[in-house]
Image (cartoon, coloured by chain):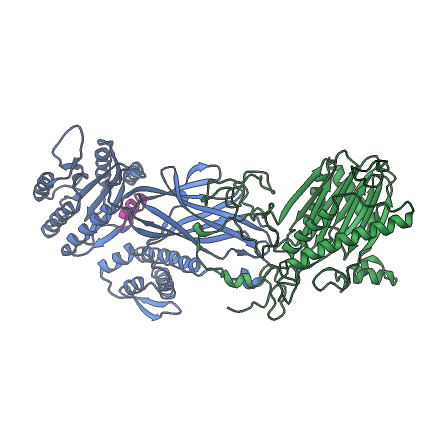
Amino acid sequence: MAEFTASVFQNEYLPDGGTDVNAIVTVTCAGAGTAGQTGGGAAGEIIIVDTSGSMGPQTMAAAKQAATAALNEIVDGTWFAVIAGSDRAMLAYPAVSSGPGLVQMSAQTRSQAQQAVSRFVGSGGTAISTWLDLAGQLFGSVPQVTQRHAILLTDGENRERDDTFEAAIARATGYFQCDCRGAGTDWQVDEIRRISQALLGTVDIIPEPAQMETQFREMMRTSMSRGVAEAQLRVWSPQGAQVLFVRQVSPTVEDLTDRRVVINPLTGGYPTGAWSDESRDYHVAVRVAAKAIGQEQLAARVMLAVGDDVLAQALVKATWSGNSELTAKIDQQVAHYTGQTELAAMIQEGLAAKASGDEATATTKLGRAVQLAAETGNDEATSKLKKVVDVQNEREGTVRLKAAINKADEMALDTASTKTTRIKK
Amino acid sequence: MSTPTSCPACGEALAEGAAFCEACGSKVTATVDAPAAAGVDVSSEPAPFDELGSGPISAPTRITPLTGSPGQQGPGAPSDRPCLACGAEVDGDGYCTSCGTKQPSERDHFRETPASWVAGVCDRGIVHAGNEDAMALLADEPAGSRAVLVVLDGVSSSIDSDVASLAGARAARETLRTPLPRGMGTDQGRDAAVAAAFAHTIEAANGAIVATTAADSDSPASATFSVAVVEGNRLSVANIGDSRVYWVPDVGETLQVTVDDSAAQQLMEAGMDRDAAENGPQGHAITRWLGRDAPDLTPRVAALDLAGPGWVLNCSDGLWNYISEPSAITEQVRAVEATGATAPLDVALGLTAYANACGGRDNITVTLARIDAPAPATGQNPVPTNEID
């Protein structure tokens, strides 16, 4: 049985009249076990590979290799399927047209699936909504599968109406998780990130076909290590208080505020998906009514629940004080992640401005990003930023856009924008 | 580890090396042990309620966790007491499940209702970090027969004053379980016998306070003391320091029955008016107290025959700071009664709430005995049961 712990980092002291309480809550899971093996229901995995006509021979060969490697990582007994996606979704494996659309992994099914993958041929367009919908239907055809995860590989832009695409994402949201990878540089980061964010997955660029196999193997390995199928972050706040936001801030920035579901009038639940042995940080901000100096109250209980069981909780407090030495301090962790959240926004907004031809805004925002990456010690962001801008003064955030930017570098900066680093101890 | 230069609770400047804030009584060293940025492992947090039952009062610390729910931590162990702020259920960790208000520990807010006509509230107030006030009550039915109201106000700047004051209050109460002596018939004789009984009471209170003080303490616990004994229509009082007994008749003017041992009182006796004296720089300095370094232990003793219905009020300066004039006391008691409060506990809570609404700058103790139809106490001197007239 997995064990969760929660710890809180905050400055609980508020000045006279102060109302806003910020805290970082670190939730750690240990003893998660293996997906589908912990008695909480079976695990299902679907590999979705873009087989549209845009997939060049080299990319297609690499995709086949990657899917084969991923199939090798799926633990025996896990329910799985392989989808070939173009302007419609084809169930490549298992070869069924009715009944359960997933089969259990074994030496035999693995080999059959790998043979099916080897027969992939690129043709047709790209309609990702149909891929997501078929995945949802396949998961739904095997009711004992309660932990649902997909890997999606694409190489091109989605050729569908936006509302069709959004509706399919909405249908899948909360039903299965999906990690997304883009091959080459002809796909849209924004578009694919919409899927990965809604479906609690990751997004990344695979610039070279040769890197695909490793990425797929790791993605699947990570998924199989998630022995906790689903956990929910719950935030209780007092009567009359307002939850300003709830964000995951590590390992990546994901705003969960709008994904609140009502648990009871004072408690909201936020999805966190499946867990392996890992640690995640959440930034919770709550606005409470100011009290008299010397008063103490609970501003939030941040809990982690699996099913109906609350397995860990952290208390976020508010104490009003007249001592400005205490109230003026911003907690180091809160400051760090506030900076990292702004860093993610600056990178995304800067690249969007650049794409729309607004170089002045792009320069300002990416300059600020360089400054924040340095201040918060995010070396990965710094090195990725330096491939897009020439840094004149890191501390002041003055930069110049590079004259020639490698498209893959720009996309890598974009996909990695939400990755955060932990505070350096 | 370094000593802060200002109080963590109220921000007042601190003397170098001070262990407590002179202004609000907060323990200063506590902030050093709990830096704001530290991670808190929730699972190891002690339950906030202090055990306050019949256990040894002289224990030097107050961190014994609630034993009502062994092994239970975090959510799911609700407390028996409703939230003092909104009345909703309180979670096992001491926070209200609705408004989030941190519930005071048993020591920070407690109530006693020994009989239908007698009640008291002892409350931390708002500014102080702990409650060094204490009270101990005793009363018999029927209403108006016999009641003992003991109030001690522990001095904030000394160590363990909270433990000491409660020990002192309870020790004093124990000495007053039997009626006061009536002497040999003359008023003088009676006064002398009562004074001797109160001297014994104070000796017991002082003994309990000294017993809780560490031998090598350079800041020994100390406290004020005031006691009111109602026996029929006779109110007897004794005090050291500035806790006060008032008689608040339903009709007519309130009378302050005790006389403070304070710099302000000395100034008033020298002709200064009450307002100027009590709000002057030495307004809150007491000239006598209980404790190891007590200058002398002879209480001021007084008595009053109660003529009509009203309230006997024994309170600490946490209340009277805001309503020192007897007329202000009358006004506030009437205001609380006007809210519909008639039971002694409700009136005491109303007065406590008033002091908190005024800022709650000090610990607040309000004890009351309701007198409806004062009549001479029945019976004579306590008579041993085996003695036959």
State the image coordinates of residue B335 (x, y, percent, origin top left): 76, 41
User: Is residue B161 covered in magenta?
Assistant: no
Determine whether A45 is above or below A141 in the image. below
State the image coordinates of residue A76 (x, y, percent, origin top left): 16, 41
In the picture, measured across the screen, residue B371 lies left or right of residue B218, that is right
User: Is residue A193 covered in magenta?
Assistant: yes
Who is closer to the viewer here, B174 or B86? B174
Determine whether A201 is above or below A363 in the image. above
In the picture, measured across the screen, residue B300 lies left or right of residue B175, that is right
Asked if one can make out residue B321 in the rendered structure from this viewpoint, the answer is no
Residue ID at (38%, 46%):
A256
State the image coordinates of residue B187 (x, y, percent, origin top left): 91, 47
Q: Residue furthest right?
A: B186
Who is closer to the viewer here, B159 or B345? B159
Q: Quadrant of the C terminus of chain B?
A: top right
Who is closer to the viewer here, A162 or A358? A162
Asked where in the image residue B164 lies, by quadrant, the reply is: bottom right
Q: What's the magenta bit mostly, secondary-structure-wise?
A: helix
Asked where in the image residue A18 lies, by quadrant, the reply is: bottom right
Asked if one can make out residue A97 in the rendered structure from this viewpoint, the answer is yes
In the picture, measured across the screen, residue B248 lies left or right of residue B69, that is right
Q: Which chain is green?
A: B
Residue ID at (50%, 43%):
B92
Q: Which chain is blue?
A: A
State the image coordinates of residue A396 (x, y, percent, origin top left): 40, 69
Q: Residue furthest top?
A: A98
Determine whether A160 is above or below B210 in the image. above
Give the residues in magenta.
Answer: A190-202
How many marks on residues? 0
Residue ID at (50%, 60%):
B34
Asked where in the image residue A415 lies, by quadrant, the reply is: bottom left
